Each structure stands twice: as C-alpha cells, then as structure tokens.
Image (tube, rainbow, N blue to C red):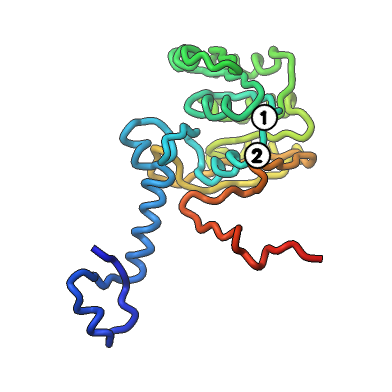
Amino acid sequence: MLWMRALSQEDRKTRNRLDIVDIPGVAVFQAFALHILSEGLGFRKSLEQNVCMLGDGRVIPMMSYGLIEYLMGLDLSSFEVLELGGGHSTEFWAQRVRSLVTLETDSDWADSLKSRALANVEVRATTAEAIGGEILALGRSFDIVVVDISGNRYRCAKRALQVLRPGGFILLDNADWYPNTTELLRRADLIQVDFHDFRPLRWYRCSTSLFLQKEFRARPRYGRLPLPLIGGKDIADTNQWDIVTD
C-alpha cells in the first residue's frame, strides 16, 4: 500500500484512489520516529535478544543513543580506558581503544566478561566497598574513566579525577540521577556535555554525560564528525552551503 498525505481536501481524484490512505502529518511523523527507534537504533532487536545492540547487530552500551553515535565517530585507538562497571559496554570499548581495564562488582558478570577473552581487556572482580581503593592500587592513569558502577558513584568519581590523564574525559552514566557527582566533576574544572536520549532496554529517557578536560580534542575516526546519523538525512556530498571558500 502507498502511504501519503493528500495535499488538498479538494483533490478528489487522488483521495478516491483505493491504494492511497489519507492520514494526518503527525501520524506520518510518529511512524517514522518509531521506525528509527525500533529498527535503526535497534530498540526492538535489543528487547528480543536482551542484548544492547543497534539495528545492524553491533553491540553497544546501555547508554544514551546520542552519546553512542558520538563515540562511534571518535578516533580512540590510542586511548587507555578504565571502566568502572562492565557489560555490553566492555565489548564496545574493546573494539575502539588501545587497552581497557574493567572493575566489576558482580563476580558472576566479571567471570562472564573474562570468558570472552577479549585481547586488550583486563577484567577484575571487586566490591562496591573496595573499588575506590582498587582504582588507586592500579598505580596508573587513564585517558578515559567510565563511571557506570553498581556502587557509590560519587566516591568513584573522586578517584577517577585522581587517575585521569591530561586531555581525557570522565563518562558518567545516568548523570541525571547523580547531581552531587556532576557538581563534583564540574568543580574539578571539567566541561560537562550531556547527552539526553532513549537507550536500549529502557522505556524512559536518561542522560549520559561527558566531563572533558579543557585539553581534550575530538579526533574523527572516519574523516568527518559527526558521522551520518542513524535515521538521519545525509546531504553532505551535495550541500552547497558547505563548500570551502575564501
């Protein structure tokens, strides 16, 4: 069936065709928005398989879709990452960074992550009470610290500040739930950038926030940033308003 919205109430010839359904513009908008979320961003497939993934099957973190698309466009190949709280995100980071250390408070989940034997990943089981000391006991610094732990995120963020390298950033998931933690990171003179969006396996919107050091510089992974959006309209090759001129 051909779906369209008739342009005029007087266009009887068009409106009387049996293969055309006249529907309101808002219904068309809702249908496209739902299709992008369900199929392009993979919300339906994630629910069916209980795995956070995009519509094309790529595994992603349970974080804001907008943040995920931004990270996918960055060249992080030289970055060393500390992940506080592992999951589907562990595989996502492993595919993009030089090395990853994951501290996980769920021992069974830690064992599951270890069994995947990702070449550039070290997984350590810990507890919510001990993780602060274990961060410092690693005796090294990191370009990115991901705070997504089942535990006190304020305490973890304080330790993250102590091991963050110049030019790096801290990622705080569910940032809208942790106002004390976001204030702590802002007071540390980091630049807060919030990504408010839906996420896999959740019916509500939430924030994932980056806290960037002033020296951070985004390096495109594929020659352009941002990448063409999932469900977007890519006119870059024909955009006459983007021609390089004097």
* Mark sitting on residue 77: 1
Label 2 is placed on what type of residue? Arg
For label 1, count other residues whose C-alpha is less than 10 Å away and answer few (under 14), some (14-19) or many (20+).
some
Indicate left or right for 212 with 111 as reference: right
Label 2: element kind = loop
Q: Residue at x 36, y 67 (%)?
A: 26
Q: Distance between the residues labelled 2 and 1?
A: 9 Å
Label 1 is placed on what type of residue? Ser
Q: Which residue is drawn at 49% across and 34% down?
A: 60
Q: Which of 11 and 115 is in front in this view?
A: 11
Label 1: element kind = loop
Given contact means CB atoms under 8 Å apart, are the residues at marks 2 and 1 in contact? yes
Residue at image mark 2: 221
Where 108 falls versus 211 (above or below)? above
Indicate left or right for 217 with 178 as reference: right
Q: Nearer the viewer, residue 228 or 168?
A: 228
Q: Can residue 236 be seen here?
A: yes
Res 68 → quadrant: top right
Res 180 → quadrant: top right
Q: Which residue is drawn at 45% across and 46% down?
A: 198
* Mark sitting on residue 230: none
Where 16 falls versus 206 (above or below)? below
Res 20 → quadrant: bottom left
